[in-house]
Amino acid sequence: MTDNLINDKEKFFNGWAPYYDCLLTTVNYQAIHQRLLEYVVLEENAEVLDLGCGTGRLLNRLAEKEPTLRGIGIDVSREMLRQARARNQYRERLIFIQGNAASLPFSEKQFAAVFCTLSFLHYPNPQQILNEVSRVLSPGGRFYLVDSCIKEKNISNSIPWVGKIQLYNQQQREQLGREAGLKCLSHRYLLPKVLLTILAKPEREQETVTSHQLKIGLTHSH
């Protein structure tokens, strides 16, 4: 994100943070998280990352389900993180840090799974997000992308106080994944118009051929 956009988004979510877990939000997110967990596959001692972690509810639910899981939540909003740290039920296994999802401060192949729940629509450069996700995923790791979905080819909008958002259909999600070297495993509706897309990093790097690499290969073949 650009500095101005980051500041605008942070201001919005800082103001929303104390009220983020209100009844309506809690009921919707609880239903989404509960259905998401049905599709999550993790081995013992898995290390996971939650992009746009908000108040940390998803990581707490994951830690409750997986007793050996270790997780990091990252968010642009200091106030969201303050709420997450205060409500952290698994302090020995979960941490929450401030950062930009477009430039993740983590090592390559560090995480067995990356989650992004109802925050992907805020990112102005989705391909950069996918590239970073692919970089930090270990071979065979999975990216669980949950967001509102549309059938149209493309839609963007600007919401007062929130700023610009961008929604993506199934084909666009798959294309973004391919460009980052990730394979789409499935799409599942968790709620009406809320779609889970599961993308996986190949077990072996040579299995990955991005569109850019394919173009280079075709050029060199002439």
Image (cartoon, rainbow, N blue to C red):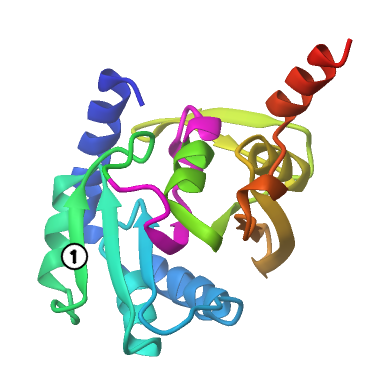
Residue 103: x percent and y percent?
33, 34
Left or right: 11, with 117 as reference point = left
Residue 36: x percent and y percent?
55, 73
Dot 1 crowding, Cα within 10 Å, few <14, some 14–19, many 20+: some
> Which span is picked out in magenta?
106-128
- Asked whether residue 136 is in view, the answer is yes
In the picture, residue 13 is in which quadrant? top left
Q: Reply above or below: 71 against 130.
A: below
Q: Reply above or below: 195 against 57.
A: above
Front-lying residue, 187 or 130:
130
The N terminus lies in which quarter of the figure?
top left
Q: Residue at x 65, y 38 (%)?
A: 176
User: From this viewpoint, which residue is outermost toward the top?
Assistant: 222
Q: Residue at x 26, y 38 (%)?
A: 12
Q: Residue at x 60, y 51 (%)?
A: 148
The C terminus lies in which quarter of the figure?
top right
Front-lying residue, 50 or 55:
50
User: From this viewpoint, which residue is outermost toward the front?
Assistant: 221
Is residue 197 part of the magenta span, yes or no? no
> Judging from the image, what secondary structure is the residue with disc 1 in?
strand
Q: Reply above or below: 7 against 23.
A: above
Count of numbered tags: 1
Left or right: 76, with 169 as reference point = left
Q: Amino acid at mark 1?
A: Ile
Q: Reply above or below: 45 against 77.
A: below
Q: Which residue is mark 1?
A: 95
Is residue 119 part of the magenta span, yes or no? yes
Residue 201: x percent and y percent?
60, 55
- Asked whether residue 21 is in view, the answer is no
Q: Residue at x 21, y 76 (%)?
A: 93
Left or right: 30, with 60 as reference point = right
